Image (cartoon, grey):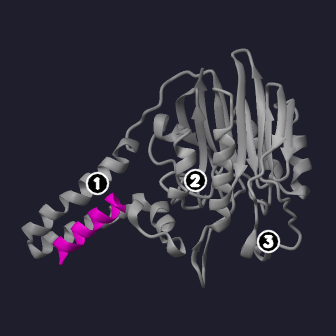
Amino acid sequence: MLAALALLLGLLMQLHAQITDRGGLGSLVESFLPWFGLFVPVLLAGALWRRSASAVVALLLPVVVWLNLFGGLLGDKSHPGGDFTVAEHNVDAGNPDPGGTARDLAASGADLLALVELTEQARGTYEKELATAYPYHTVQGTVGLWSKLPLSDTRTIDTRIDYGPLAATKPADVKLAYNRALRTTVVTDQGPLAVYVAHLGSVRLMPRGGFWTESRDRNAQALGEALAAERSKRVVLLGDLNGTMDDRAFADIDSQLGSAQDQAGNGFGFTWPAKFPVARIDQILVRGVKPESSWVLPATGSDHLPVAATISW
């Protein structure tokens, strides 16, 4: 039995893309795929207790598969230097201290700061606290970008947002606009940099219907189409995608942009929930620029952790 479970664990991780996505099962498994490695020491303890050589040998399969999938994230891939620092944070609509959050983010020294889940009530606070450090900014709906460099050609991106069954979960005093993505151009000495800021639809485990990802998946498809039409050679996407890049829902986006965390991070860089992060759903993705380092910033009053990265031209 232990040997069979070890083989099943290895096959599950290796063939995760073949798992049906009915009821969102495939996305749910892929969102927490790195954590399946925790079953290896459990099975190893059982194999040693049973003195089962076959189970120990069978465990080589999940170990090899896990290392193949995630072993590259264990080391520090960062490099010193970089021309530009970008940061992203889901500031949380229910954040009790938006002023403190804004000051903490400004202290990070990021040249570009993307904020998502901005409410009408808190927008003025962020604009006031960030005005000195960031003379340029744009807010479109619930997403915004603060910059130390001029912005141009700013427009909203239609991500076909729909809160669906989640609309009733928002507090009555919290108003969220329906626009949750923007595209702008940052004017730099090295040329234009296209920057996207996005907050894709939420996902939930529903009593009926399983893992609900319909809104998020529709948003991801629309964002992928917008990126495919992007003519700029240098692109940065900053946002809360409400999913990890292992999730099949982001295959189109993943094929066009690379993760700064995967290329220049140290560890998994989990960002949610802030008190005990188990998944990296806040992303910095790039094309045409080189990530030099990527890291997670200290907690603020939000239920997400901020992320940052330095890039070079």
State which region is magenta. 1-15
Q: In this view, does 202 lie to the left or right of 126?
A: left
Characterize the local packing of mark 2: few (<14), some (14-19) or many (20 or more) Cα atoms within 10 angstroms: many
Q: Which sits in the foreground, 198 or 230?
A: 230
Give the number of the mark in front: 3 or 2.
3
Q: Which residue is drawn at 54% across and 30% down?
A: 291
Q: Residue 271 carries which label?
A: 2
Amino acid at the residue labelled 3: Lys
| Dot placed on the residue nearer the N-terminal end, 2 or 1 | 1
In the depicted structure, whether residue 138 falls above or below residue 17? above
Quadrant location of the C terminus? top right
Residue 273, quarter of the rendered image = bottom right
Residue matched to label 1: 65
Give the number of the mark in front: 2 or 1.
1
Disc 1, SS: helix
Amino acid at the residue labelled 2: Thr
